[in-house]
């Protein structure tokens, strides 16, 4: 949890793997408006990190303002977030629909033909619908009825040649 105001920046990191709740309430302390923050965890050891900064700090890269300093200190504990792959920041096409290799190739062609900006084609869970049987979903395996080995290879080649990416939505669970 991180906060910033005109004079300071502060952050609190509560580290606990158990179910944890955080309650925020408006409060007044010594006639100063503020907030009450209550953390409640079901179990586990108390591990808490508190960071605060109210001034600019000189570093080898220049000055860090109070918010950047707290964020940097916080990241040394939690880890710095890696940059996402560039294509994930682009335009995605996702539609809940019965899907086949032919339909994906058709959509890919149409997006190119009409110069519609799409970076990622997303297939919903129907790609795993084995022989259109409602109880036949087999995740991590394409429906052999709609995705033959030849069609899969052709689809992958066409999507890659267009500079797009594919992703599949999963609802993974163990089938009984």
Image: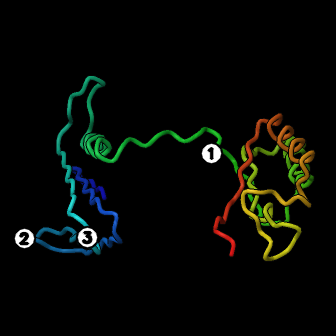
Extreme-left residue of the structure: 30
Asked whether disc 1 touches disc 3, contact meaning CB atoms under 8 Å apart, the reply is no
SS under mark 1? helix
User: Taking 100 as reference, is 139 left or right?
Assistant: left
SS under mark 3? strand
Extreme-front residue of the structure: 176
Extreme-top residue of the structure: 60
Relative to the observer, which residue lies in front, 8 or 40?
Answer: 40
Q: Position of residue 140 (x, y in %)?
A: 72, 57
- Looking at the rendered image, the disc whose residue lies closer to the viewer, 2 or 1, is 1
From the viewer's perspective, is residue 131 above or below residue 110? below
Q: Residues within 10 Å of mark 1 (few under 14, many from 20)?
A: few
Q: Position of residue 73 (x, y in %)?
A: 26, 42
Which residue is rendered at x = 77% and y = 35% of the image?
163
From the viewer's perspective, is residue 17 above or below residue 28? above
Q: Estimate the spatial distance between the alpha carbons at disc 2 and disc 1, rounded to whole Å.
A: 48 Å
Name the residue beneath numbered marker 3: 39
Which residue is rendered at x = 69% and y = 48% of the image?
91
From the viewer's perspective, is residue 48 above or below residue 176? above
Name the residue beneath numbered marker 1: 88
Chain-order first, disc 2 or disc 1: 2
Q: Position of residue 71 (x, y in %)?
A: 31, 45
Quarter of the image where the C terminus is located: bottom right
Chain-order first, disc 1 or disc 3: 3
Q: How many marks?
A: 3
């Amino acid at each position: 949890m991180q906060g910033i105001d005109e004079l300071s920046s502060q952050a609190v990191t509560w580290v606990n793997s158990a179910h944890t709740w955080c309650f925020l309430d408006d409060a007044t302390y010594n006639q100063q408006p503020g907030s009450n923050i209550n953390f409640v965890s079901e179990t586990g050891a108390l591990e808490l990190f508190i960071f605060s900064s109210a001034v600019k700090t000189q570093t080898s890269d220049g000055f860090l303002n109070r918010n950047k300093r707290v964020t940097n200190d916080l990241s040394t504990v939690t880890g710095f977030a890696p940059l996402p792959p560039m294509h994930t920041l682009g335009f995605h096409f996702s539609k809940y629909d019965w899907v086949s290799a032919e339909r994906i190739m058709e959509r890919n062609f149409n997006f190119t033909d009409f110069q519609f900006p799409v970076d990622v084609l997303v297939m919903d869970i129907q790609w795993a619908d084995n022989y259109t049987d409602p109880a036949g979903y087999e995740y991590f395996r394409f429906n052999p009825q709609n995705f033959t080995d030849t069609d899969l290879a052709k689809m992958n080649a066409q999507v890659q040649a267009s500079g797009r990416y594919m992703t599949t939505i999963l609802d993974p669970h163990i089938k009984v």
